[in-house]
Amino acid sequence: MKSLLSLTFAMVASLGLLMGGLFAATHVSTEGEPHHFKHLGAPLWTSTPHRVDPSNMAYERMAPDPAMIARGEASETRLAALEEKRQTQPDARTELAALPQTASTFSPAHISYCRERYRSYDPADNSYRPFSGGSQPCVSPYMNDQAQATAEDSAGDMVAENVNGPIEIGDGGGDLGATSDVHMQWCSMRYRSYDPASDSYRSYGGEIRRCISPYN
């Protein structure tokens, strides 16, 4: 009988201890009430417009970066210097357009070159219409041949009086002219912006540079 009472007391004590632990754990782990957001039932977009006052906006603007300001000023200064340099340098195309030229003054090779390169080429005034509008004179590598032929004709007309009779003054620069033609053809194939009149091209940075080839 005594052992039965001891067993019953142990079971009741264990059950009470278990119930007390569950009760304490429930109260300790219970969180507070969840946060209730306001206007959850309100529509996302309003049906009545409201005027916004820009002067009453509570925006916080960051201070400007001095390094970025310095880079911008340096870039503007460099662009202004390039533009001033471009304006002060003479344009070979403008000078060529100012000269009185007709179709008869150009060689057939020059006219054929311009017709193949520009669909709007007009041999009457040696000009074409670029995509940007206006009119531009056509400059080809064969213009130097024409100038050389004209110089040779002028030199052939000059004679020197000698005791043995008139001696024609020849031209000893044939090799130099051929080298110049090869040089211009090399530059025209290498640079799309090459201008044979000034022997220069425009780089990607906007600078005008002289063309240097293996035939210089």
Image (cartoon, rainbow, N blue to C red):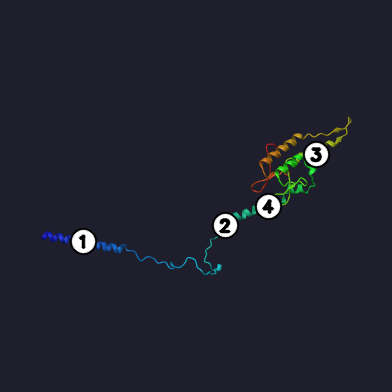
Would residue 212 be seen by someone viewing this image from the given angle? no
- Mark 3 or mark 2: name the one nearer the start of the chain: 2
Residue 43 location (% of width, % of height): 47, 67
Q: Which mark is residue 64?
A: none
* Rendered residue at 57%/55% (across/down): 68
Q: What is the secondary structure assignment of the residue under circle 3? A: helix
Question: Residue type at mark 1?
Answer: Leu
Viewer-nearest of discs 4 and 1: 1
Task: Determine whether, in the image, residue 159 is placed left or right of residue 84.
Answer: right
Check contact, mark 4 vs mark 1: CB within 8 A: no
Q: What is the secondary structure assignment of the residue under circle 2? A: helix
Would residue 4 be seen by someone viewing this image from the given angle? yes
> Quadrant location of residue 64?
bottom right
Question: Residue type at mark 2?
Answer: Pro
Task: Determine whether, in the image, residue 176 is placed left or right of residue 161.
Answer: left
* Rendered residue at 86%/35% (across/down): 159
* Distance of label 3 from label 4 (alpha carbons): 37 Å
Q: Which mark is residue 83?
A: 4
Residue 28 location (% of width, % of height): 30, 63
Residue 124 location (% of width, % of height): 78, 46
- Mark 3 or mark 4: name the one nearer the start of the chain: 4
Residue 207 location (% of width, % of height): 67, 47
* Distance of label 4 from label 1 (alpha carbons): 96 Å
- Mark 4 or mark 2: name the one nearer the start of the chain: 2
* Rendered residue at 18%/60% (across/down): 11
* Distance of label 3 from label 2 (alpha carbons): 61 Å
The residue under label 1 is 15
* Distance of label 1 from label 2 (alpha carbons): 75 Å
* Rendered residue at 79%/38% (across/down): 149
The residue under label 2 is 66
Q: Which mark is residue 151?
A: 3
